[in-house]
Every structure is written in structure tokens, then in C-alpha cells.
Amino acid sequence: MKLIYQDVFREIRKAPGRFISLFLIVVLGVAFYAGIRSCSPDMVETADKFYDDYNLQDIRVISTMGLTDDDVRAIEKIDGVEMARGEYSFDVYCRTEDDQSAVKIIGLTEGIDEVKLTDGRMPQKATECIVDDHFVNLYGYKIGDVLELISPDDTDIEEKIKHSQLTVTGTFVSPQYLSFDKGNTTIGSGNLSGIVLVRPEIFAVDYYTQIAILVEGAKELNCYSEKYEDAIDDVTGRLKAIKESREDARYRQILEEANAPLNEAKEKFEQGVKDLADAKEQLENAKQEIADGEVALDEARKQYQEAKEKSESEIASSQEQLDTFRKYADAVVSYFGSFNSVLETLSNARGAITTVVQLIEGIDIPEEYIPQEIKDSLQTIEGSIDEIFSETGRIADDLEVLEDAGIITHSEITQMRSLADKIRYADNISDRMAAVSQLYDLNAGIYSKMPGRINSVFADYQAQLDAAKNEAQSQLDDASNEIAENAEKLDDAKTEVAENEAKIPEAEQELADAEKEIKEAEEEISKIARPEWYILGRNYLPEYTSYESDSKRIGNIGKVFPLIFFIVAALVCLTAMTRMVDEERTQIGTLKALGYSRGSIMWKYISYALLASVSGSVIGVLAGGKIFPYIIITVYKIMYPNLVGISMPYNLEHSLVASLAAIGCMSLAAFFACVKSLSEEPASLMRPVAPANSKKLLLERITGLWRKIPFTWKNAFRNFVRYKKRLFMTLFGICGSTALLLVGFGLKDAINTILYAQYGGVNKFDAQIVIDVDSSQKNQDDFIKALESDERVQSYSYVYTTIVDSEAEGSKEILTTYICVAKDADNIDEYIALKDRKSQERIELTDDAVLISEKMSNMLKLKQGDTFTVSVDQKDRKTLTVGGVVENYVEHYIYMTPVMYETLYGHEPEYNTLVVVYNDDMEVISEELSEDYLKYKAVGGIMCVDEMIDKFEDMISSLDSITYVLIVCAAALSFVVLYNLNNINISERRRELATLKVLGFYDIELSQYIYRENILITIIGVALGIVAGIFLNSFVVHTVEVDIVMFGRQIFLMSFVKSILIAVAFAALVNIIVHFKLKKIDMATSLKSVE
Amino acid sequence: MKFIELIDVVKEYSTGKGGVTMRALDGVSFEIENGEFVVIVGPSGAGKTTVLNMLGGMDTITSGRVLVDGVDIAKYNSRQLTKYRRCDVGFVFQFYNLIPNFTALENVELANQLSENPLDAETIMKEVGLEERMDHFPAQLSGGEQQRVSIARAIAKNPKLMLCDEPTGALDYNTGKTILKLLQDMCRNKGMTVIVITHNQAITPMADRIINIKNGQVTDAHINEHPVSIDEIEW
């Protein structure tokens, strides 16, 4: 056995080319298979590690009304939840150099959704922040710069965040944002430009915007695996179970919060209503009182008047009485005086009378003898005396009246009366006369006192009366004052009432306002929707699923391409081993004759095959497992720049499959190659193998034609029939390499189609200007005026664009989609061609259905008549009907008419974009145009199509590497196969070729002799390769395509030409090498016996 | 003037790593007249084949001169040598070396396409007695028949010189004889110079000139004044 091994090594040394080529084929096949197949799992692994290292949330809960600590606690209690954290985030504007861009400001959380710092340090104060890498690069921020944040709406930014000036302390990348895409937003143009991470204490709100959840044990699982999905689904299910109760709780809380001030206001209002009623009543009362007061006042005035009159008349009558009484008294007194004079006279006559009387009496003269005269006189005297008596009685009566007044005393009257009585009743005249004298004396005494008394009494009386008068007057004055006072009071009261009355409408208005406010508030509260939870998995993170799709795409490619290589490698190995065994027939025969067992002879070849395949597999696995994933992941990192690290663990499964398959193929090839030879007898083995019979071809039956065919061609034709296996494999090789080339170029075409079909065929405008709709109307008008007068611009049109998430039933995808509403929907064709890709026919836009872009229809599996929903940040969900599918390559679009938009959203679209077509007659330089227009305040941004094309070309140039990989692969395939087969061909036909040389074939003729076959095979192979390439290209284009673009579906003519030329060039190159190999053929070989 | 003249031809091969040079030809000199039937004879390893290679323009020499028709072909470059082989030399191989893909006739035609003034292939086929089997593939022919095709192929080029390397080596006695006869006839009839290389001393009587080679040297070269027909030779 040792000899066998020695023989194997000698074999290798003798023909190192064969061993190396076998080894290389195995390396290539295994590396390709194991490598490309590992790409997809490695990509996933790379991302998974990144996610896990930074604790990317597994689930997040967002609510339409914010979330609370109670929610966090409730979620934390759920089985399977490892961690739940409330997170704050708001979309705001960040002021940039001459514009503002939308950023998402997020509070940092510990243990979940962590980020990788790429520079600087984490924020330590509330006024510090870190910003994502891309944003920093885009706007040229440095660490230490200050970001100025602006509220996106009318509210004060400080209602949300306490500081609006933040110092950048570092930059980061986050697993939440693998690419430049930061997701969409409801503010601005709908695109988020950056992420700003801050310390959570900066937020001024009392609710979380989302709760991020880590699921227990999810980290250990591959995040794109079904197991992971199951684990997440379990927890999601449990979250759904508490969803409703938590929503209710939050609803109640919000209602409470909203109702508290309302109730207060209501109370206030009711109090106000009551107060107003009270006030009104009081006012009414007051009015009544005033009326009453007025009546009373009138009464008082009347009374006053009456009293005044009464008192005046009383006083007047008192005065009159007094005066009358005085007059009376005066009369009485004067009468009394005159009476007294009479008395005086009488009294004075008393002596005489007495004497007379005494004489008469003394003489006692009968009465008839008394003179008549005397008698008359006596009579008269007697009469006078009687008169006096009666007069005195009358006077006494009169005087009695004065007694009360004190003008005369009772005793005086009594004295008077008693004297009068004496006068009356005295027996004689003398006595009577005496009484008269006495009376006179009394009376004179009295009379003398009387004026004094009267004066004093009347003075008293007058004084009394005056006093009474004064008192009455003062009383009247008081009353009058009171009345005046009351009148004044009443006036005041009236003024007050009037004033208060005037206040009532105001108060009423106030109350009405308050009522209205309350109503409004109530209405608003009634409008407060029940909060709704959205439980979202990672597939709602931007790029999360598209990364998976990309890895799957590579996986799909990994299923086809390596197989091609592998089949080729296996076939080549089989041929090579067969050839080797054939070459050594004699040796096999000898060994057999010497008595070696079939097994041990076979073992030589199998061990040779094993040596090549095992070593090739090891190298292939080691190299391929790293190189291909490295290349592919590096290429994809261009699209996912935030992906950190590369994980390329050797994939045991694919490595084993590739290695075992390679080893198996080789060993089997060796086995089958030997079996045939070994079954022969040693003697026959020692003889040269009977050359394969040439047969007459069908072609030869047409003798005329056949005769005209040059020999060398005849030979080529016959060889095809003779070496079918080799022919087939050569065909396969050339066909494969042509197909690969076509795929490589076709892929570029597909991408280039995007450019020219999108920016030439679909988007007919040359520039797109974003209008800052928040800027003043004047600014906007200024710009429009400038635009209209700019002769570089041929025409323009208003368009409204916004970004929404589109979802459809029956598809897991959530697409970021543009809604595009052209103001002038009828003339949209001048700017954007809405047409079917295949027929290029225009598709009409109607008011009841939307048109969607082709890729979107593919991804969401939508066709005409289907419905799907759009939403922004899980809000504002609308259902749309597909009216048609239009050609489009970049991004996803929903086109609708303004009418439809308005019916859908209830308001007119706010046209925020202008599409502009340049003047064809002028050479318009986009840079200049943008520079000019950006000076206007109304211009928020400008995108020129030619600049976009440049940018796009830059971006897709990274995909060139894939094309190069394919070209290199094609070359490798072409070389390995053609070279190997040509080698075999030459070695098999060495004798024939040497003979031809001896016969005098020039080198070139000899080469041509071989080339003819090669050329024929190349032609056929290339032709087949083109056909295969078209199919393969279609497959590759479909699988490689990223979500937001649709690649072109056709291959350009130039690509066919290039593929053919390169394939032919590869073949030619091999043929050149063959030429030199042929040159080296030793003519002496022809002389040797057949081995 | 001699048709072929070898003067002091030395051919050395360096073999292996040791730098050992093996001298295959060690100063070989002989001459051949035009139209002669020459037999170069010697034991295995004597240098016969090397001489053939030299004459056939298939190999270069280390020193000396090989004059063919007055021209030193040793000085030819590879292209001149090819032209020389193509037009002036016809080869007959021990193992026939027919192109398996071609029919007998085609094998002949292949050769006469190369030559400047070829003979008609079918006539030649008739001359070698294969007119019935012209359309057969080599694999369908016997060894003798194949060798006839080989001879026909050589003749069809109408060469100045025919070199035959052990033409009977793989054939049985009788077939070998007919082949040699054929060669002799061609020589006689067409006036072609025919050089047969063999280890078989027995056939030397049929030659016009006999050259003995041993250990890379010509041991004897003489003209046979009375060549006999092959039919008269037995071995």
C-alpha cells in the first residue's frame, strides 16, 4: 500500500497541472457554494449580533394618547417580558444652515435601544445630545456645535422639551436605523433627516410616547428566525390581552384630566348663573324698593306739605286765636277799664249819693214827697248800681275766660263776684255804693295790674307759639331734609341699579361665552378618541425587513449560482479522473497482472481524488466562507452604513454539504473511471484503447455538400459526435460563463434602466422644488413670480407630496410610500407619465381610485380593484382602491386626484412641491438654477433630476462590484472549464496532433485544427448562454432588487454584444494558451508506441 | 552532388537533473543519392530514430550539417522545417498514426492538401490497393491496410524523400512484406528516395544503400550493387 501512496505522490509530481486544476476546481466549487450560501446567514448573523449587542427592542407599544408608568408596570408584569421601558420621542425641526430639517428627538434609555458611539461621549446634562452619524455628515456638524430645535407646530417647544438648544457631545449609530432611512414623520416633507438622542429628563411631558420591550430569551434566538417570531408573537398575544384594559385606564385618566378643569368651569358657570339671577333679583328688589321709596318719598313730601300746611295753619290759627284772645282780652280789659271808669264815676258819686240818700232817709220823707228828680236820680242810680252788678257779672264771666290765661286770678273774680253780689244784694244803697266803691277799688287794682299781666301773658303765649312754630318748622325742616336725603339716596340707588343693570348684559355675555366654552370643551372631550395601542414588532423599524429581504435575496442567489459552479466542477472532475485512468490503462493492466487487487488499484485513484478534494474542500471552505460573505456584506454595508461589525462564522452545514459533495463527486468520479478499466482483463488493458469510432454524420449523406467542407471542419464536426461528454461540458462552461456575463451586464442595465426610464420616461420634469408652505404668502408669490419670469423654465406645476406607510392584507410588507397629488391632474402627463410599462399606454387618473407604482403592486400583491390602507405613524388610517398600476422604478408612489384627496382627508392638499420643466432651447445648468432659487425664502429645497442621476449613479456604482464579481466568476468558469477540457482534448489527441505536426502542419494550422471545434462549441455555447442568461438575469434581477426600486426588465443590445465579446475573448484566451501548448507538442511522440 | 549528406552530425540530450548529457549521435556522416531505397539498420537504442528525426526535420542537431538537396536543414528555423516536412518529406510511422476522425481517403487528402504539387488521392489509394476501402475509418481497417493508407498519405504529398520508421514493426510477417514491397515499388516507380529505418538486418538486401548504425555512430555504409526484390527475401 505504501507503494500506492508513493505512486499517488509521483503522479502529482509528474502532472502537477492536473492535480492543481482538480484542486482548484474543488476550491472554486466549494468556496463558491459554501461562501455564497453563507452570505445570507452571515448577513443575518451580523445584524442579529448588532441588534443583540445594543439591546434593540423586540416589541414596542405605542399609543395614540401616550403611555404611562402604570402601562410600563403592567407590561413588565407580563410573562415573557424581560424589560419594558417608557421612551420619549418627538419629531421637531432642527435649524440648519439655511433651512430646517425634521429630526426625531429621543430620550436615552438604559438597557434597551442602546446605541454605539462613533465619536465623542454620551450626553451627561439635559442640555447635551448625541446625533446620528449620517445627520452630522450631511449638515457638517461637529462635536461641540449647538443644535437649535424648533417646534413643528404652533405649540411652544418648551411644552415638550425643556431645552431647545442642545450641545452635540457625540455621534452614534443605532441598530434601529441600519441605513440612511430614519422612517417618516408627520412634519415637514415627511422625511426624517436625523435622530437626536438626549437625556430623558429634558422632556416636559408626563407621558411616554412609546414603551420598548425586550422579550425574555429572544436575544439567544436569531432575530430573523421563526422561533424568534414565535417568541415575539407569544408576548404580543399577551400584550394584546391587556391592551384593552390599559387603553381604558388611559382613557379614563385622560378624561379625568380633561374633565377636572371643565367641571371647575362648569361650577363657576353655574355659580355665575346663580349670581346673575340673584343680582337680577336684587336689582328687581332694588327697583321695587326704589319705586316704593319714591312712593314713600312722594307720600313723605305730601305729608310734609300737609304737615307744613297744618302746622302753618295751626300756628296761624294759634296766632289768630292768640291775637283774637288778645283782642278779646284787650277788649275785655278795655271794657273792664271803661266799666271801671263808670265805677269810678259812681264811686266818686258815692258821697253825694250817700248824702242824698242819708238825707232822704234821714228826713224820712215819704216817697211821694221826694222829688221826682231825686227819685229819678235815685232810680237811675239804683239802675246804675244794678247795671254794675249785672255788668260785673258779665265782666266776671268775661274775665273768667282770662282767668286761665292768668290775666286775672280766680280770687279776684270771686272777690269781684262777691262784691257784685254785695252790690246787688246790699240793703241799701249806701252799702251798695260802698260795695261799688270797693269793687272799683278792687277793679282798679286789678285793672292796673292787667296790662302788665296781659303783656306778660301774651309774651308768654307768643313765645310759646313761636317756640311751637319753631319746633314745627324744625320738624318740618328735618322732614324736608330726610326727604331730600331719601331722594338723594333714591337717586343713588337708581344710579346704582342703572349701573348694575348695565352690567347684566356683560355678565350675560360672559356667561354665554363661558357656556360656549364649556360646550366646546365638552364637545372636545366627547371627541377625545379612546386611546388605541399599537403593538409593533421589529418589522416596523425602518430597514429591518428590507435587510432581511436583502439577505434572502443573496440567499436565493446562493441557491442557484453555486450550484452551477458545483455541477461544472463535478463534471470537470469526472472527466479529468476518467482521462487520468484512461491514460494509465497500461499501468493498471500491469498492476493487475502483477496481482494487485482491484481495490488497491482503485484506492490509488480514489486516494488521489480524495487528496485533491479534501485539500480543495478545506481551502475552499476556509477561503470561501470568509471571502464571499466579506465581499457581499461589505457591498451591502454601503446600503446599510450603520451596520456595525461583520460576523462571519463558518457555516458548518453549508461547509459540510459543499465539502462532502465535492469529495463525494471526486471519489465517485474516480471510482466510476476505474471500475470500467478494472473490469477489463490485464491483457486488453495493456493494449491501447480502441479509439472511439467515428461515425458518418448525417451531414455526410449529402455528399455534395460534405465534399465541399474543408477537412478541418469535417474533423470538427466528427469530433462533436465522438466526444459528446466533452462537448457537452465545454458547452456548459461557455454557456454558463456567457450567462453569467449577461447577468452581470444585464444587472447593470436593469439598474441603468431605472435611471433612464425613471428620470427620462416616467419623471419628465427636470427639477422638483419643495415649497416651504409655512413661509409667508408674499414670499411664495415672490418666488412664483421669479419662476414665471425665468426663461430657463418652460413650465411648472403644483404637486402635493407626502409620505405614508402602505399596508395590504395578504402581505407582511409595510411600504414607505409617497402620495402624490397633482393640482392640475389633467396635465400631469407633461411632468409625470402615468403609463403601463408594457404597453406604454397612458392610464387615466379618476376621482374614486388611486394609481400605484408597479413595484408597490408587486410587493403588496395588489392589482386593479384591490384595496389597501395608508397611515402616518399609525395614525390617520385610510383605505384606498387601486385603479391601476403605473410604470415606476424608484420609490413607491400613490397617485390621486385633488378631489379624491379632499374626500379622503377632508381638506384640500397643501401643494408643497413644484415640478419644473426646463426650456429645451437653453442649456440649463442645474447647479446655477438651484443656487438662484434657494435664495428665495419660500424654497425649502430643490432637487434637479440630473443631479439625482449623478447621485444615483454614484450610489449604484457600488453595485458594480457585484457585476465585477460576476465577470470574474464567468472568467473563472470559462477558464477552468475550457482550459481543463482543452488540456484533456490535447492530451487525448496528442498523438494525432504530433502526427499532424510531422505531416507539416504549421503551428497556426495545427491550432486552427483544434480551434475549429472550439469555435463551433463557443458559438453554440454562447448562443445557449444568451438564452440561459436571459432567464438567469430575470431571476437575478428579481431577487437582487431592493425594496424601494424596481429594476429594469430588459437587457440592452450592448450588453449582449459585450457578453458575447467577453465570452469569446475568454475562449480566445484559452485558445491562445492552447496554441502554445500545441507548439510544445513533441513530434517524436508520434513515433512512440501507444502507451 | 549527393541528394542527402550528413556531415559529423552530433546530437546530445541533456537528461534529468544531474546535467548528464547523453550523446545519441556521435559524429554521424553518410550520404544518399537521389532515388535510392535506403535501409538504416541498427539495434535498439543505436540512434536510428534520432537520425530519422534529423532527416525528417523533427528535431535539431547539436553540431554538424544535414544537407538535403544541397541545403543545410540543420540551419532551418522551425517554420522552414515545417515547410520542409510539409513539402519535401513523407512519413510512414510504425503505428500508422492515421487521423481516426478521417476516412482512409480523407487521411490521404489531408496530406495532399498540404503539399504544393500533390498527387491525386484516389489514384494513390488505387495504387496502394485500397480503392474498395477508401471510405472506411482507420478503426475499421486492419493494420496492413492502415499502413497502406499511411504510405498513400506519405506519397500523396509527392515528397522528395520518404522516411519510414519501422514500417513493419507492428505488422505480421506477410503484411510486413507487402508493405515493404509497396515501398520499394513506389521508390522504383516514382523515383522517390525512400529511407527505411529498421532493426531488421534481414531486409537489407532489398536496399540500394545500407547504413549500419551502432552506438550513435555509423559503423558501415555501403551501396548494395544488386538489390533484390523483397519477394526473394525470407526471414
Image: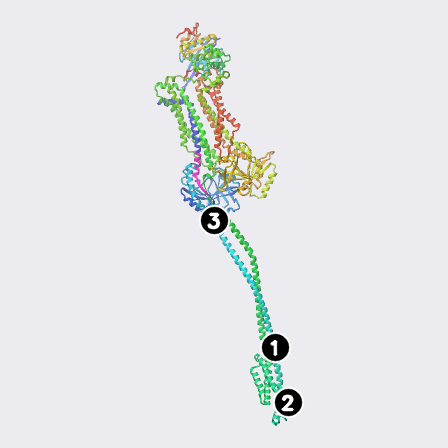
Crowd rating for badge 2 (residues with CA inside 10 Å; few <14, some 14–19, many 20+): few
Query: Amino acid under label 1?
Result: Thr
Q: Earlier in the sequence, mark 2 or mark 3?
A: 3
Of circles 2 and 1, the one toward us is 2
Q: What distance separates the C-alpha of mark 2 from that of mark 3?
A: 136 Å
Which numbered marker is on residue A255? 3
Q: Which chain carries label 3?
A: A
Decide if residue A95 is in sight here.
no
Which numbered marker is on residue A303? none
Q: Do labels 2 and 3 share a chain?
A: yes
Instruction: Describe the element under mark 3 as helix, strand or loop.
Output: helix
Return the x and y of residue B191 as percentages of the image width and height.
48, 8
Relative depth, front residue between B33 and A929: A929
Q: What distance separates the C-alpha of mark 2 from that of mark 1?
A: 41 Å
**Which quadrant, please, contains the C terminus of chain A?**
top left
The image quadrant of residue A463 is bottom right
Q: Which of marks 1 and 3 is nearer the N terminus?
A: 3
Please name the residue that numbered disc 2 is placed on. Answer: A376
Instruction: Describe the element under mark 1 as helix, strand or loop.
Output: helix
Q: Which span is picked out in magenta?
A: A41-63
Q: In this view, does B39 lie above or below A901?
A: above
Relative depth, front residue between B183 and A8: B183
Return the x and y of residue B134 as percentages of the image width and height.
46, 13
